[in-house]
Amino acid sequence: MFFCAFIFIVVSSPLNAQILVSDFRLSASQDVTHLRIEYSTSYNTLLNDSLTYSLWKGRHAIHVSQINQKFGQNFKVTQTENGFFLEGADSSLQIHIEEDTYNFALISVKRISKAAERLDDCIELKSQEVSWYGGPQQRLQYWPVDKLTFDDYSYVTKQVDNCAIAERYWLNSVGLFIYVDAEAPLFLNQVASKTLCLTAQKKLPYYAHDNEPISFNYKIGIASDARKAHMQAIGRFLKKPSGVPDEQMIRHPIWSTWARYYRPINDSILHIFSDEILQYQFNNSQLEIDDFWEPCYGATEFDTNKFPNMKTTTDLLKRKGFRVTLWVHPFINKVCEPYYTNALNNGYLVLDTNNNASTQWWNSGPGEAAYVDFTKPAAAKWFTDKLTTLLDATGIDSIKFDAGESSFSPADPVLNATKKSHPLAITTAYLNTISAFGSMIEVRSGFRNQHLPVFLRINDKDSDWSWDNGLPTLVTTLLVLNMVGYPLLLPDMIGGNGYGNNPPNKELFLRWLQANVFMPSLQFSFVPWQFDDETVALSRKFTDLHAQYTDIIMERFRLAARNGDPVNPPIWWIDPDDRVAQLINDEFLLGENILVAPVLQEGKFSRDIYLPRGKWVSQTGECYNGPVWLKDYPADLSVLPYFIKSGSVTAKNCFSLIVVGFSVIMYVTQKFN
């Protein structure tokens, strides 16, 4: 069906009002869509903060945005077939319909100001009617993301708030997305559930040392629903992985020294840890040597007091059946000599505008460290060569790469990149450099790096039940990152990291493990045998369950690489217009046929579960016809609620559904037994 869309440009003044109307015919929406632009004038001057544009489906506004921009007197409006151009002495605004097909429309907004200190575009979130997804990774990881709050928040990758991913992409539940240009000096100002202001300001941490005009450009995509809009964004902007990570890291758990042993570590710990894993009959993909194995941070060689002969140790671990990986960071502490001086003299470190390399990370004090400058090819090669030499000498199989956020640079960095790409260029360059180490690596940060075929590790979580970086945010972070184009995700340690001398108890550990089962990978550091025999038995049960579904996870990984589909989408993905599903924040999908509803609250042994449209069978064979709420669904500490969908049977054919559901379960079980 062909639909009409209109753009209304309304220009009014107290004394001499005039209304301009332009009619555009768009085909992308399932309803009549209007793009309406309104602004006020007085005595031939455009009034400040008076310009708004809104997008409508039928009688419902799906996007309302207020623009602050000064155009002064004698501004000029030029209307074309596909949009309009508003120009003043020092500013311009262009809204242009770039594309119009039956399935999709794309609108560009381009703003330039020579005089303004900031450009704001404030979006009405309309949370009662519309939900928003995407945005940054955060400690307080709410879903939908319109619940977040920001105040003059520099939108760059940074350690604060776990903001290791800061993609400039937002998607709403009615099929509209916003994608902001990488070079805009973007800040966020958000009032929860009310407004999100996208603000361009030429100030730190962005480059602010020239008199160039502020440019603020973004795209708006419109489709008939959120799923269709998101797939358009993947194909046009977000990119898709160019391959898939190592399969063994998906099938069997990673075992890390970090949360259990912290720092420092030594040769004896590796032998004790590996022997325990074998003694308790757990599988493994690899044993990870985490912080602190160097004599000083940045040496990129083993401390021989802790590891007298690392090659001998690695060979022994491999004979036990372990691959071995190593935690690596991009910093050099100033006390780490002669390595620091060598890097500084060769120009391998990020400098500020005063030629100072001083910075700080979590293993240094203020001004006591430096950051390798991966935007310089020589520095990137030097870093890569050092690691390659280390791996060759020790037999280490691969690397867990940490950090990479732009905030670790000196406050006003000078990078080997365009001025407008500061400071985020360091994150992109770091990821592009280390991706050469292959499919077994993991990373934790990124900016416009969705194309890399490597695991992105979800940032460190705390060992508690709260929304402040606790267990509930494991699920919401999984959803946020999938929906900004990062489907190849590695959840962090099962049970959290135990920070503040607060390790997980048995209940939290098991609920965390259950929540992880249908995510792409399992990663242990705290171990089941720290608790009791029941925890060991249940942990074997759930690690085996994860292994049984590895083929399905790998299938979804390959689909992500082929088409860009999320691996663990929100449950509305299979019914994008379901308003209840759009608000669910404690369930997720593996692909499109497995729905997972883990228990995420302390002391709870049942929970309410929402099943969207479809025919569903539980792991015990009960049949359900969605959409439906399952109230107080029982889930003691041994139970992970999950459901398999079949679209091939009708609601009246429940017996067939049970057979289909059990057939899937039996197939997976037999394949791996």
Image (cartoon, rainbow, N blue to C red):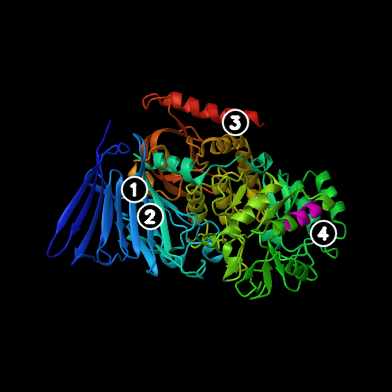
Q: Please state which amino acid type lies under the numbered disc 3.
A: Val
According to the image, label 2 marks what residue? 110
Q: Main secondary structure of the magenta part?
A: helix
Dot in front, 1 or 3: 1
Closest to the observer: 241 or 628?
A: 241
Residue assigned mark 1: 96
How many numbered marks appear? 4
Quote the CA–CA distance across marks 1 and 3: 51 Å
Q: Does the magenta run of residues contain 389?
A: yes
Please name the amino acid that badge 1 sits on: His
Query: Image point 26% across, 35% down: which residue?
Result: 3
Kindly state the secondary structure of the residue where label 4 is placed.
helix
Separation of marks 2 and 4 at Cα, in angstroms: 60 Å
Vertical side of 61 occupied by 664: above or below:
above
Q: Which residue is mark 3?
A: 668
Between marks 4 and 3, how big is the CA–CA gap? 39 Å
* Image marks 1 and 2: residues in contact by CB distance under 8 Å: yes
